[in-house]
Image (tube, helix red, strand yellow):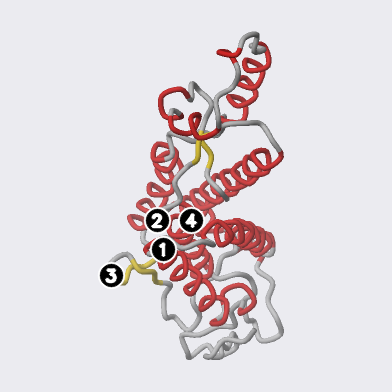
Amino acid sequence: MASLTPFLRDAPNECAFQGEPDIYGFGIRLGIYLQWTSVLIVRTFKLRGRASLAKSYVIFIFAIFVALLFMTANATPSTEINKSSEDTPKGPYAVEVMILAYIIFGGVYIVLLTGNDPMPIQRFDVDTVTRLCRQFVFWCVLTAASVYYIWFWLDGINDRGFLETPGGCGTYGFLFAKVSLYNQSVKTFFAFLQTLYVPTLELREAKIPPYSAAMLIKRLHEDQSRAPTTEADEPKPVRDCQATSSSNNQGGGYIRDY
């Protein structure tokens, strides 16, 4: 999918380069923004379909993160940069990594967390296991992406083969102003934000800790050990269980639908 504006890597007098339209081209970005808008509309008007959008976005950010790792693997340290016959440096640009950061972490909050209330775990079935697996993959990808960006801002952007924008234009990002990505204060600030990102989300998601699967299994064994012997001990209807889940869900855990 091609971008509307052509980027030319071999035009040193222009602030442009050949990017990766298959990863963050105009069509890709437009689809992402439309997906974010759809989630906000579904949430505002309480429509159905939000869970499906969240599931697809988990797969999407996983694919984007894998592509980011491949881009990093293709980077060559600055002392060994491969050059063509025109002495044009090859490798990913630092600003490309910044673009993918906006895509990954911007969608995490808008699509996966906003308005997606956790549901109490009531039983150990295939649907619950599937949701737990998706939740586990989500937190693994999010944590790995945060660790990657901490490394990128503290070390990777310096001498690991990430290129500056050609033509002497400088490499800039948006931080409520035009800031250089190679400014030490800016790099430290972004690394600090990434350090706080996952712990802050886990505090916000305190009702669905990563170990809720173990808590669910423990509760399952406890339920099996208490076999009903009288009519009074028989399980209550599902509606009664849901009505008292906030007080009787002792360590059962909560889970989001993605």
Residue 182: image tag: 1
Mark 2 to mark 3: distance in Å? Answer: 15 Å
Of the image marks 2 and 3, the number of the one nearer the N terminus: 3
The answer to whether mark 2 and mark 3 are in CB contact below 8 A is no
Of badges 4 and 2, the one in the foreground is: 4
Mark 1 to mark 4: distance in Å? Answer: 26 Å
Q: Position of residue 256 (x, y in %)?
A: 52, 44
Of residues 39 and 60, the one nearer the viewer is 39
Q: Say whether residue 181 is left or right of residue 231.
A: left
Residue behind mark 3: 177
Residue behind mark 4: 108
Classed neighbour count for the residue bearing mark 4: other residues with Cα under 10 Å, few (<14), some (14–19), many (≥20): some
Identified by mark 1, the residue type is Tyr
Residue 248: image tag: none
Q: Position of residue 237 (x, y in %)?
A: 55, 30
Of the image marks 1 and 2, the number of the one nearer the N terminus: 1
The answer to whether mark 4 and mark 2 are in CB contact below 8 A is no
Identified by mark 2, the residue type is Lys
Is residue 87 placed above or below 175 in the rendered structure? below
> Residue at the location (50% across, 23% down)?
251
